[in-house]
């Protein structure tokens, strides 16, 4: 190649050598060379911790706290039999102890799943509504769109603070009216598991609906507008247009958006920590954080079970969506 | 349109009835009314929490706990509760107090420093990867992209235990599943490194996918022309492809910045105490109000408003970039 002449020759010998070597690499080698930073970063911060977490989850602290012993899948078995529940804070159990509301909401697994399912369901509905509005052409659309996106950009700690202040027993003005409706506990609201779970879910819906709206909006805007002209000529009402054209065409987009959000919802931690506390609303991530300095093995096992559940959700949605999901 | 229907229904009485009549003849009117009703509903629900913060922030501290924020009003002899909270008095001093009680500006500075550092690292590494995935064809491409996608699906909780131990710097890092020691890492808790590293890995996949899309759209001819002119391979990336994809780079930058500014999990764990001198970002600043000044709700609200301002400005200024980034990047995944 002739690129080494002229400007290259002014540089130092070593650099020219490296450059020449790089120029002559095949596409494949060049690709892997450029990917080295990605490999190093993800290797250190993602791959190594992942493997190490799995390794830790196979060990348990000995009875005298002096050493750790290999227990194989013992930690996982302990989690599912309830033997490890005594290490979890605030009397939380991993699996529900029964089918009463109290027992269900005391279980880290059930609380996380309830949170994910309920919040993602309402976020999808509200996001669809917001997307349908933003899809229209009207004066001031830019500002409305900015207003609807803003909650998505609010830091989690401030989102938590907002809802903490709205439902706090001293200044929260929303507690009395909602308590009258029977939705919340009238006193000590943020320390009541059912009420706090409700508030955390509402907070998440407030923040993340906009994200759903943007994803769905992208799907809406890729629909061929000619279809609506045809529908109008055929005499279809607005509702028929939505049911027969819009909805089927954005269903794949909604599927991906739901997948994306479910994965994020399963990780919930920050909003719980700010609005209430991990002992009141026990999510899986909460349990990992609460136990990792004292009971590594148990904590690592919970972390890995969380990852496995997310993996199952992802696989399930990919199978349901087929090729479109990737 | 309303006038034509009005002529036909002069016998009808009352504006509501007239509107109903015209709506029956012109169903589009109902859709438009529904549309505006829904729009107002969404606007109120998204913006109301900020209004509530304002109400709390300007209420003098002494008035916070006395009486209700929902005043009872007496209108034409009918008394009822006003449905909107209003401030009990006015004292904007909380916005100054926020910086006096706790060095909140230092927390925000920490957040900015962490976000900017992470953004620079992510942009550089993701640019290389985006170039590779967007413009080169090589064996293993699909598999590697799937791998990066898979990593982005793992919860942060699955990474935090070993990372915390490594950053504590007490024991040497060993090869997983063996006891072969590699090296003892320096103590990094309470330093920017312990947060920037996880942030970079966590938020890089999205940037990689955004930049892959944008870099892949640059015509081959432009890169070839630059190469014929004598640019090196890397030079073509940083001098031709990156500037031409400026909107994509800006999108990745804005999304990474916001993501780091908003992050909670690692921010709260890796800065072990919520002190600004320990590189604790706004998470620590806001939480220290919640834990130390437990009744100064006006300060909590004022701190939240101050903390949220940078991202609100960013959203208003860069909303086009955010929308295109979230839709193109996330949907490509």
Image (tube, helix red, strand yellow):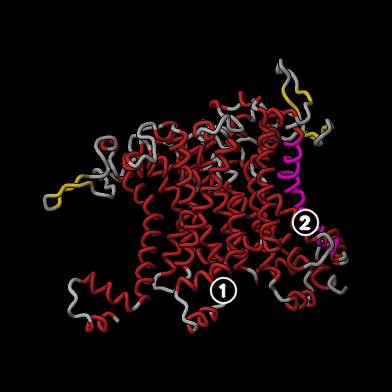
Q: Which chain is mark 1 on?
A: A
Residue A257: x and y in percent read 59, 58
The magenta stretch is A28-54
Q: Could you tell me what secondary structure mostly forms the magenta stretch?
A: helix
Q: Is residue B207 above or below residue A24?
A: above
Q: Which residue is mark 1?
A: A223
Quarter of the image with the C terminus of chain B is bottom right
Residue A244: x and y in percent read 54, 72
Rounded to the nearest whole Å, what is the CA distance between mark 2 and mark 1?
A: 31 Å
Q: Which residue is mark 2?
A: B144
Task: Tell me which residue sits at (67%, 46%) in the image.
Answer: B154
Q: Is residue A284 above or below residue A126?
A: above
- Circle 2 packing at 10 Å, graded few (<14), some (14-19), many (20+), is few
Q: Does residue A230 appear in the picture of this structure?
A: yes
| Picture quadrant where residue A4 is located | bottom right
Q: Which mark is residue B308?
A: none
């Amino acid at each position: 190649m002739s690129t080494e002449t002229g400007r290259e020759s002014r540089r130092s010998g070593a650099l020219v050598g490296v450059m020449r070597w790089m120029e002559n690499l095949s596409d494949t080698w060049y690709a892997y060379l450029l990917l080295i930073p990605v490999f190093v970063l993800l290797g250190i911060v993602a791959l190594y911790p992942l493997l190490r977490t799995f390794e830790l989850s196979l060990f348990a602290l000995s009875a005298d706290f002096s050493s750790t012993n290999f227990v194989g899948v013992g930690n996982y078995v302990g989690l599912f039999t309830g033997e490890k529940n005594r290490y979890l804070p605030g009397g939380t159990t991993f699996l529900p102890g029964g089918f009463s509301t109290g027992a269900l909401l005391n279980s880290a697994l059930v609380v996380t799943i309830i949170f994910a399912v309920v919040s993602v369901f309402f976020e999808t509905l509200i996001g669809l509504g917001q997307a349908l509005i933003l899809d229209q052409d009207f004066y001031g659309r830019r500002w409305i769109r900015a207003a609807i996106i803003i909650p998505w950009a609010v830091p989690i700690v401030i989102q938590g603070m907002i809802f903490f202040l709205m439902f706090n027993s001293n200044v929260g003005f929303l507690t009395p009216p909602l308590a009258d409706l029977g939705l919340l506990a009238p006193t000590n609201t943020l320390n009541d598991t059912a009420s706090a779970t409700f508030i955390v879910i509402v907070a998440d819906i407030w923040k993340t609906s906009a994200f759903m709206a943007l994803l769905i909006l992208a799907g809406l805007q890729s629909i061929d507008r000619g279809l609506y002209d045809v529908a109008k000529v055929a005499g279809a009402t607005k509702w028929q247009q939505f049911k027969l054209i819009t909805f089927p065409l954005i269903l794949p987009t909604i599927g991906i958006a739901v997948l994306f959000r479910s994965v994020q919802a399963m990780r919930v931690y920050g909003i719980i920590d700010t609005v209430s506390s991990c002992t009141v609303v026990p999510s899986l991530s909460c349990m990992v954080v609460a136990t990792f300095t004292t009971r590594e093995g148990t904590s690592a096992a919970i972390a890995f079970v969380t990852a496995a559940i997310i993996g199952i959700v992802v696989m399930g949605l990919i199978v349901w969506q087929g090729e479109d999901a990737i | 349109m309303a006038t034509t229907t009005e002529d036909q229904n002069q016998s009808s009485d009352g504006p509501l009835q007239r509107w109903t009549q015209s709506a029956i003849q012109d169903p589009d009117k109902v859709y438009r009314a529904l549309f505006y009703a829904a729009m107002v509903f969404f606007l109120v629900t998204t913006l109301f929490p900020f209004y509530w913060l304002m109400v709390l922030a300007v209420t003098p501290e002494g008035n916070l706990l006395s009486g209700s924020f929902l005043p009872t009003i007496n209108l034409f002899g009918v008394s009822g509760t006003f449905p909107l909270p209003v401030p009990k008095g006015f004292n904007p001093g909380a916005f100054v107090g926020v910086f006096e009680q706790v060095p909140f500006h230092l927390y925000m500075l920490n957040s900015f420093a962490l976000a900017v550092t992470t953004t620079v690292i992510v942009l550089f590494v993701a640019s290389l990867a985006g170039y590779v995935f967007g413009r080169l064809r090589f064996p293993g491409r699909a598999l590697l992209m799937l791998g990066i996608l898979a990593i982005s699906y793992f919860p942060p909780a699955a990474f935090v235990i070993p990372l915390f131990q490594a950053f504590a710097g007490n024991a040497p890092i060993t090869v997983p599943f063996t006891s072969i020691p590699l090296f003892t890492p320096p103590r990094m808790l309470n330093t920017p490194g312990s947060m920037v590293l996880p942030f970079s890995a966590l938020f890089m996949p999205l940037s990689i996918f955004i930049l892959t899309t944008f870099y892949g759209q640059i015509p081959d001819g432009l890169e070839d022309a630059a190469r014929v002119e004598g640019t090196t391979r890397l030079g073509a990336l940083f001098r031709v492809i990156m500037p031409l994809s400026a909107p994509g780079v800006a999108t990745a930058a804005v999304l990474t910045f916001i993501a780091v500014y908003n992050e909670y999990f690692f921010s709260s764990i890796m800065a072990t105490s919520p002190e600004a001198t320990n590189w604790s970002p706004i998470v620590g600043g806001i939480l220290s109000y919640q834990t130390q000044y437990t009744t100064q709700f006006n300060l909590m609200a004022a701190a939240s408003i101050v903390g949220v301002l940078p991202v609100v400005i960013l959203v208003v200024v860069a909303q086009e970039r955010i929308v295109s980034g979230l839709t193109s990047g996330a949907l490509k995944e």
